[in-house]
Amino acid sequence: MLTMLSQVTVGVLKYVRQGLVAIALAGVVGVAAGVANMSLIGTLPY
């Protein structure tokens, strides 16, 4: 019982960590895209 519970907990923690990493990566990509977009707009003549 206890070993099964700990295995489930480890699985959930891995899943949560993967989700957090994915969210963090998406945020970084979004910020980078926004910065690139603004710098591109800044270089346009009009």
Image: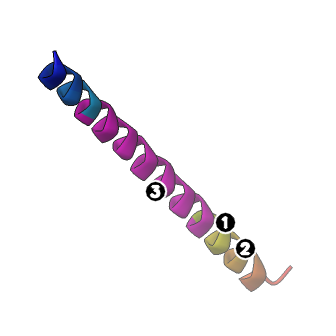
Q: Residue at x 72, y 73 (%)?
A: 38
Neighbour tally class for label 3: few under 14, some 14-19, many 20 plus, Cα within 10 Å: few
Region of the chain picked out in magenta, as a range: 10-32
Q: Nearer the viewer, mark 1 or mark 3?
A: 3
Q: Position of residue 22 (x, y in %)?
A: 42, 48
Mark 2 and mark 3 lie on one chain; the one further toward the N terminus is: 3
Q: Quadrant of residue 6?
A: top left
Residue 25 marker: 3
Q: Are marks 2 and 1 in contact (CB under 8 Å)?
A: yes
Distance between mark 2 and mark 3 Cα atoms: 20 Å
Q: Is residue 37 left or right of residue 13?
A: right
Describe the element under mark 2 as helix, strand or loop: helix
Q: Is residue 27 magenta?
A: yes
Distance between mark 1 and mark 3 Cα atoms: 14 Å
Amino acid under label 3? Answer: Leu
Residue situated in front as seen by the camera: 13 or 21 = 13
| Extreme residue toward the right, this view | 46
Q: Is residue 4 left or right of residue 16?
A: left
